Image (tube, rainbow, N blue to C red):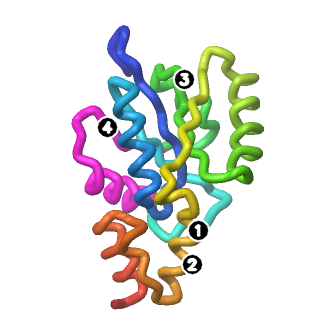
């Protein structure tokens, strides 16, 4: 629960794995809000590389800010946001393809909960081409993704490949 008057934002995602682009969005969100909750989605339709607990640990290791909370949720995002008494959902946008999906999602969320806003932050130019899926694919073939992910995530990806 958030104290009265505290500006809290929820930044949801699968974060499988966490990328430097995600960290950029988190850090910029912390500049706008009193507290940011990074909410790791436990999506039953996906087969993740890392467990929810591993992803949460990667986030906590990568970002040391007392105003950041790392949590997880299942079910509808908007219900989670309401339970947390937040009023803003932060989403990162990389390209036009992201916009179409995020546009639909934001409008559905708005229909379900008109008092909750969606704030879009453009991914920085250094990371606009990076996605978790692409990182996983490159890493699975032994490619070097160390410049795209936090050090702890890179170690975990290397460990999964047995190196």
As helix, strand or loop, the secondary structure at mark 2 comes to: helix
Instruction: Name which residue lies at 45% across and 52% down.
Output: 22
Disc 4 + disc 2, Cβ < 8 Å: no
Horizontal side, residue 5 vs residue 120: left or right: left
**Which residue was labeled with disc 2?**
137
- Label 2 near label 3: C-beta < 8 Å? no
Up the image or down, 20 lies above or below 4; here it is below
How far apart are the alpha carbons under marks 1 and 2? 6 Å
Label 1–label 2 contact, CB within 8 A: yes
Mark 4 or 3: in front is: 4
- Position of 63 compared to 2: left or right? left
In terms of sequence position, does the residue under pointer 3 or pointer 2 come before the other? 3
Say which mark, if any, is on residue 82.
3
Which residue lies at the image location 63% right of the left edge and 62% below the top edge?
A: 46
Q: Residue 27: x, y in percent?
A: 36, 42
Q: Please tell me in which quadrant of the rendered image residue 107 appears.
A: top right
User: Nearer the observer, disc 3 or disc 1?
Assistant: 1
Q: Is residue 24 left or right of residue 96?
A: left
CA separation in Å, label 1 and label 4: 25 Å
User: 10 Å neighbourhood of mark 4: few (<14), some, or many (≥20)?
Assistant: many
Q: Secondary structure at mark 4?
A: strand
């Amino acid at each position: 629960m958030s104290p009265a008057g505290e500006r809290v934002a929820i930044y949801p995602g699968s974060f499988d794995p966490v990328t430097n682009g995600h960290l950029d969005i988190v850090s910029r969100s912390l500049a706008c809000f009193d507290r940011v909750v990074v909410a790791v989605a436990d999506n039953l339709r996906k087969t993740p590389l890392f467990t929810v607990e591993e992803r949460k640990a990667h986030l906590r290791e990568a970002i040391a800010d007392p105003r950041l909370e790392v949590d997880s949720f299942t079910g509808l995002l908007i219900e989670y946001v309401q339970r947390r008494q937040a009023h803003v959902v932060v989403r990162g946008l990389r390209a036009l393809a992201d916009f179409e999906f995020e546009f639909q999602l934001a409008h559905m969320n708005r229909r379900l909960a008109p008092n909750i806003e969606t704030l879009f932050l453009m991914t920085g130019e250094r990371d606009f081409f990076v996605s978790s899926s692409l990182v996983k694919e490159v890493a699975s073939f032994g490619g070097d993704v160390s410049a795209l992910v936090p050090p702890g995530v890179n170690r975990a990806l290397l460990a999964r490949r047995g190196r």
